[in-house]
Image: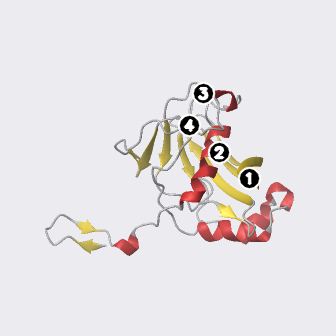
Amino acid sequence: MLADPAGAGPVERAEDRPEPVPPEEYTLYDQVIQTKFLTSRTSLVMIERLTVTRLGPEERNPPDRAYFDENRFFEGRLEPDLVADFLLKTRRPSRLEAKFHFGVPYRFVSDGELEEPEVSLGPIPAEFSPTDLAQDAPPTIGILEFSRVGFNRREDQALIYVGDNRPDGSGAGLLVLLHRRGRVWTIVNTEVLWVARREE
């Protein structure tokens, strides 16, 4: 951080700013949001601006290979190169941009504060219809936080972490495995990493 010569406080250097998330990862974020969180009653989705480096509120450090070996997510069948790419990308935060297209208005959250709106209703994908909305999705969505998307070398498997942190203290963290057939990504499995109950 540098001091602003005008005395307005520290100025963020370009090299200190988190790099933006690449455009190709948003299709997978959209798929996770549509499948796991949206209902016909969802009117707004709140998303943390920066991607996470820790997979849960109790985790102190970014995940490493030992973390995956110990927990044997998805019965230990994750491809090593998929895990390696995921771990590499979760070492530091990246910046999410207004490139989501899941058909519901969304707002970004930074440092616990709701940002000014910069998006409205995003275009609804041609292959998406209201009947695709998850029937078991929660009626309310907290603030969603995402990791970067890890890919295997063939780029036909992907791994994403998503956390749902709600105002009442409840929430959950999911590790989501996706597979690409042709140009279409689908969720093939989900592991629950943590669950928080509502505060009484």
The residue pinned by badge 4 equals 124
Q: Earlier in the sequence, mark 1 or mark 4?
A: 4
User: In percent of the image, x 65 and y 45: which residue is there?
Assistant: 31
Judging depth in this view, the residue of 140 and 44 nearest the camera is: 44
Residue 117 position in % (x across, y down): 37, 41
The residue pinned by badge 3 equals 139
User: In percent of the image, x 62 and y 37: which residue is there?
Assistant: 37
Given contact means CB atoms under 8 Å apart, are the residues at marks 3 and 4 in contact? no
Q: Where is 179 relative to 36, above or below?
A: below
Alpha-carbon span between mark 3 and mark 4: 21 Å
Given contact means CB atoms under 8 Å apart, are the residues at marks 1 and 2 in contact? yes
Residue 184 position in % (x across, y down): 72, 49
- Location of residue 81 (image quadrant): bottom right
Given contact means CB atoms under 8 Å apart, are the residues at marks 1 and 4 in contact? no
Q: Earlier in the sequence, mark 3 or mark 4?
A: 4
Quarter of the figure with the C terminus: top right
Residue 196 position in % (x across, y down): 63, 41
Between disc 1 and disc 3, the foreground one is: 1
Between disc 1 and disc 4, the foreground one is: 4
Q: Earlier in the sequence, mark 4 or mark 2?
A: 2
Q: Where is 138 relative to 76, above or below?
A: above
Residue 178 is tagged as: 1
Residue 31 is tagged as: 2
What's the residue type where badge 3 is placed? Pro
Horizontal side, residue 78 vs residue 2: left or right:
right
Alpha-carbon span between mark 1 and mark 4: 21 Å
